[in-house]
Image (cartoon, rainbow, N blue to C red):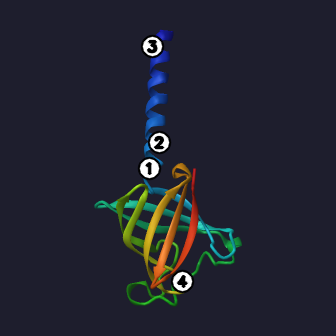
Amino acid sequence: MMKKLFWVVGLAFFFFNTTFAADLNSPVGRWITISDKTHDRSGVVDLFDRGGKIYGKVIKIFPGSGRDPAERCVKCEGNFKDKPVVGLTFVWGMVPQGNGRWGGGQVLDPHTGEIYRGTMTLIDGGRQLQLRGYWGIFWRTQTWVRAN
């Protein structure tokens, strides 16, 4: 009986670790966003795969980040105009480019309403992610931390 229990626990541990390691090779999951201006936590986003492309949605805004959790995308245009930021899909179309990097997509800054070309790169063994938005020759980079 103990031998069976040992094997069941061992197999469960193996599969848990294998699954967890696989997650670190993908940006899919929940991330705590860190402001590139204040260096404080600003919110939580969910990155998800849809048809082989990565999309990102705002899940939560931390009120202590100088932002309002009820914030709306007032400077945005088109379908984004005046939408609540929480629940907003602000990253879309990122495709794998190898070596822990995704690109070819776009990123919306809900605060300014600007849409940037974007890339995402996993760093620190997949525990952090750098999101970079490009506008011409200029860029902004945020480093996010994987949520537990």
If you read the primary sequence from the N terminus, does the residue marked by circle 3 or circle 4 appear first?
A: 3
The quadrant in which residue 42 appears is: bottom right
Mark 1 and mark 3 lie on one chain; the one further toward the N terminus is 3
* Residue 38 vs residue 71, the one in the foreground: 38
In the image, residue 52 sits, relative to residue 103, either above or below, namely: above
Question: To which residue does mark 3 refer?
Answer: 4
Please report contact status of discs 1 and 3: CB closer than 8 Å, yes or no: no
Quick one: SS at disc 1?
loop
Identify the element where label 2 is drawn: helix
For mark 4, give the secondary structure. loop
Find residue 69 and report its image quarter.
bottom right
Q: Are the residues flagged by discs 1 and 2 in contact, CB closer than 8 Å?
A: yes
Percent of width and height locating residue 1: 47, 9
Against 75, residue 69 (above or below) is above
Total number of numbered discs in the rendering: 4
Q: Are marks 2 and 4 in contact (CB under 8 Å)?
A: no
Residue behind mark 2: 21
Residue 52 appears left or right of 1: left
- C-alpha separation, residue under disc 1 versus residue under disc 3: 32 Å
Residue holding disc 4 = 72
Question: In front here: 114 or 98?
Answer: 98
Badge 4: how crowded within 10 Å, few (<14), some, or many (20+)?
some
For disc 1, the marked residue is 25
Pinpoint residue 110: horizontal percent, then vertical percent: 52, 81
Amino acid type, callout 4: Arg
